[in-house]
Image (tube, rainbow, N blue to C red):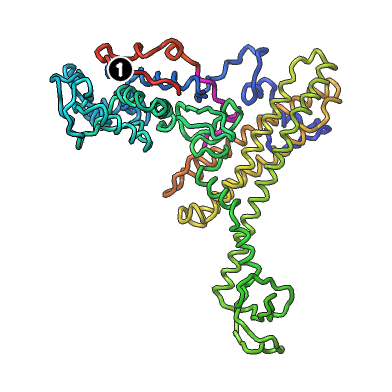
Amino acid sequence: MEVDDSLSNGEEEEEEDYYCSDRDSLDDALQNDDSYPQWTPPKASSSKVITQESLLAAQREDLRRVMELLSLREHHARTLLIHYRWDVDKIFAVLVEKERHFLFAEAGVPMLESDDLDSSVSTSTTMCDICMEDLLSSEMTKMDCGHCFCNSCWTEHFIVKINEGQSRRIRCMAHKCFAICDEAIIRNLVNKRHPDLAEKFDRFLLESYIEDNKMVKWCPSAPHCGNAIRVEEDEFCEVECSCGNQFCFSCLCEAHSPCSCAMWELWTKKCRDESETNNWISANTKPCPKCHKPVEKNGGCNLVCCVCGQAFCWLCGGATGRNHTWTSIEGHSCGRYKEDCEKKSERAKRDLDRYMHYHDRYKAHTDSFKLESKLKETIQDRVAVLEGKYSQLRDFSWVTNGLYRLFRSRRALSYSYPFAYCMFGEELLKNEMTKEELLIKQNLFEDQQQQLETNVERLSQLIEEPFEDYCEDGINKFRLKVINLCVITDTLCKKMFECIETELLDSLQFGFHNIAPYHSKGIEKATELPISWAAKSCNADNFQNPEDPTHGNAHVA
């Protein structure tokens, strides 16, 4: 099957070489329907949408796993999870490699015998080591680490830490004690004096599942949809929230593959600031030696005059008099160009031309994507016309599949230009390769890019044809063209991503760049995390240790 074959409607003699079978095309590239018995259901989404309602369920699931494995109370399990950034697998790995004592000591979880967990004070009165007052045992509280202070001192300590934003890991007040305080005791003491602050404390504990978890991040939509996204496998991926926002999970910017996050940051900075305007000014103007404003020469004479009235030599920028002859300028003689200034000017022109080359093509494909996005309603109207004319042709999903293939391919093509700008420039990957190696790799990439661009334009032209006017035989031929061209563009997208990952990025010695993998069916849409039985029916008693009478339960603020 040749990539560069013509797609003209009238050239039927090329169809034999150009088209592959309808059956193979649907299996390889397009979304199938139930009419094909060999179709298998797609793999479940590996990313989940966590709403405000399911946040507690998601958090409790990880708490339950750690509590069951280590036989811990809830607040100790939470302390471990917050310390290890809610990475349950890492907790298990540390437990196996360095054993239980090291695991607990690192996270600030005290290892005490069951007899030491009794929070009651043996004597009727006890002196608080903070305020130095003798108080009744009912006014004192002992933490799991064994340190006992009065309720008033504990409360003041907790209030200060919560206001400082340290709600997730409030340490014991005792000198050189790194144990984390019991969240139930914190909640109970603070609630007596400041109920609003106790709710804030609960909210911080709940949201720590997102704030401290590298595999869970807030959706960056604006205005904020209130959802978070959890990924199961790779944090270098692109996801779509249930609100419709598509973004890079790693940097939370718009989806930008095949650019790495560092490349996209450089490109957006380049587009956002005035660096290229400055390049043009540097290449085409000279600063006035008096007012320092940029001056552009509009004639052949090398004696130029600024609007402030100052005359100067265009060759060297030195101030001069206003009179001049064929051989000299009054009050000045520079003799020749300064080589470093000439090189600087030429470099600025070259950098500007290079940037404009990639920016123009990036913007052209981005604009095409926006215009093609408006085709959806037109395509639906055309399909409705065909369904009325040809009732026997019951399936027209290939049309919408072709349109979505165009969207995905156009998007990948548009972001390939910022990638090329960063990959083959000197700003980000300087000294990674020799000029000869860089040129070979650039030619390899541009060949892949050009093939993809050619077929994306073909698919775009094909989709825009008024196919609703075709006869039944014409519709069948048009259908084969769309399906096969979808397969071609999908294959070329895969090859371009493979080229980037294996031939370009893998060869880097100093830089570390990961890109989101290519998916034929587009950016994965996260599915909503179900509210499990744990969130529907559980209360504090479901998770607490029977030996812990003071155990409390966090709630959604």
- Residue at the spot 42% in from the left edge and 49% down from the top edge: 509
Q: Is residue 396 left or right of residue 286?
A: right
The answer to whether residue 283 is above or below residue 332 is above
Amino acid type, label 1: His
User: Is residue 87 or residue 449 the one in the foreground?
Assistant: 87
Question: Residue 88: x, y in percent?
Answer: 35, 25
Screen quadrant of the C terminus: top left
Q: Is residue 328 left or right of residue 186?
A: right
What residue is disc 1 on? 551
Residue 521 visible in image: yes
User: Is residue 172 or residue 296 the one in the foreground?
Assistant: 172
Q: Which residues are magenta?
A: 515-529
- Residue at the spot 26% in from the left edge and 15% down from the top edge: 548
Screen quadrant of the N terminus: top right
Q: Is residue 358 left or right of residue 178?
A: right
Residue 97 visible in image: no
Q: Is residue 17 left or right of residue 517?
A: right
User: Is residue 41 or residue 105 the one in the foreground?
Assistant: 105
- Residue lying farthest left? 123
* Residue 377 part of the magenta-drawn span: no
User: Is residue 291 or residue 443 the one in the foreground?
Assistant: 291
Q: Mainly helix, strand or loop, the magenta region?
A: loop
Secondary structure beneath label 1 = loop
The answer to whether residue 222 is above or below residue 140 is below
- Label 1, residues with CA under 10 Å away: few <14, some 14-19, many ≥20: some
Question: Residue 31: x, y in percent?
Answer: 64, 22
Question: Residue 288: x, y in percent?
Answer: 62, 75
* Residue 528 part of the magenta-drawn span: yes
The answer to whether residue 411 is above or below residue 443 is above
